[in-house]
Image (cartoon, grey):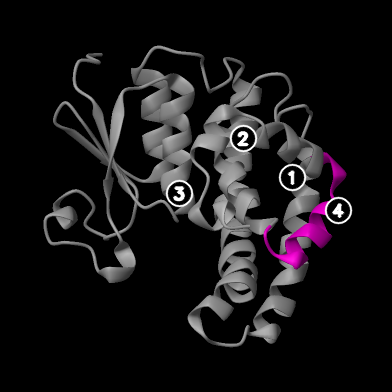
Amino acid sequence: MSETQPVILYGADYSVYARIAHLALHEKGVDHRIEPIDIFKGAPPAYLQLHPFGKIPALEHDGFRLYETGAITRYIDEAFRGPPLQPADPKARARMVQIMGIVDAYAYRPMIWDIVVERTMAPREGRAADEAKIAAAMPMAEKTLAALSDLTSGPYLLGEQLTLADLHLAPIIAYFRLAPEGQQLLAQAPKIARWWELMAERPTVQLTRYPLELKT
């Protein structure tokens, strides 16, 4: 696969899913540039040619266009040289995909939109947090952390190897810990808390910190 042309990653520095792809690019040492897309201001018409649903991220490489984060990170891992981010063992690879699915289906909405956005971003928007929404999201967030803890074999989620599962979860936890509710639930999930301490020290995680992280 040619690596002569830099990869273009379309996204925003506040986006969980753009950060997942950005982490994969850095972990593989892929030459790339970021093309900012602020979907909250409306996706530009030209961008809809890349992503018809107007979401982020999207990726472009040597004329190849791709959207959906899981597809992007797998492409990055398989198309470029660098340390492998997917296990060779079929069972371990299936576990990786399972964890990524849990993050997408059960972690993202309650942890980010219902807890973090309401607790940390509502005041910045000049409105009161929706306490009912936060309270309703807490059981699912707690259940998700418990499920992830059960699947974690440490020190990374799948043991000794950093995988796409770690990169998929890290941006969620980076935001989640900024809310007091997130800190509370992480204290009750020590395996995930220890995993986050390890991830937070990685240069790639430091390099891709959210603006909100830099302000706290």
Q: Residue at x 33, y 69 (%)?
A: 40
Query: Between residues 125 and 144, which one lies in front from this camera angle?
Result: 125
Q: Earlier in the sequence, mark 4 or mark 1?
A: 1
Mark 4 sits on what residue? 187
Mark 1 sits on what residue? 148
Residue 122 visible from this viewpoint: no
Alpha carbon of mark 3 to alpha carbon of mark 1: how far?
Answer: 19 Å
Q: Are marks 3 and 4 in contact (CB under 8 Å)?
A: no
Q: Residue at x 56, y 69 (%)?
A: 113
Q: Which residues are magenta?
A: 178-191
- The quadrant in which the C terminus is found is bottom right
SS of the residue under disc 2: helix
Mark 3 sits on what residue? 17
Amino acid on which the number 3 mark rests in the picture: Tyr
Q: Earlier in the sequence, mark 3 or mark 4?
A: 3
- The quadrant in which the N terminus is found is top left
Q: Earlier in the sequence, mark 3 or mark 1?
A: 3
Q: Residue at x 67, y 31 (%)?
A: 201
SS of the residue under disc 4: helix
> Could you tell me residue 92's position as x and y percent?
65, 24
Q: Vertically, is 90 above or below 102?
A: above
Q: Say left or right for 206 vs 193.
A: left
Alpha carbon of mark 2 to alpha carbon of mark 3: how far?
Answer: 13 Å
Q: Are marks 3 and 1 in contact (CB under 8 Å)?
A: no
Amino acid on which the number 1 mark rests in the picture: Leu
Mark 2 sits on what residue? 166
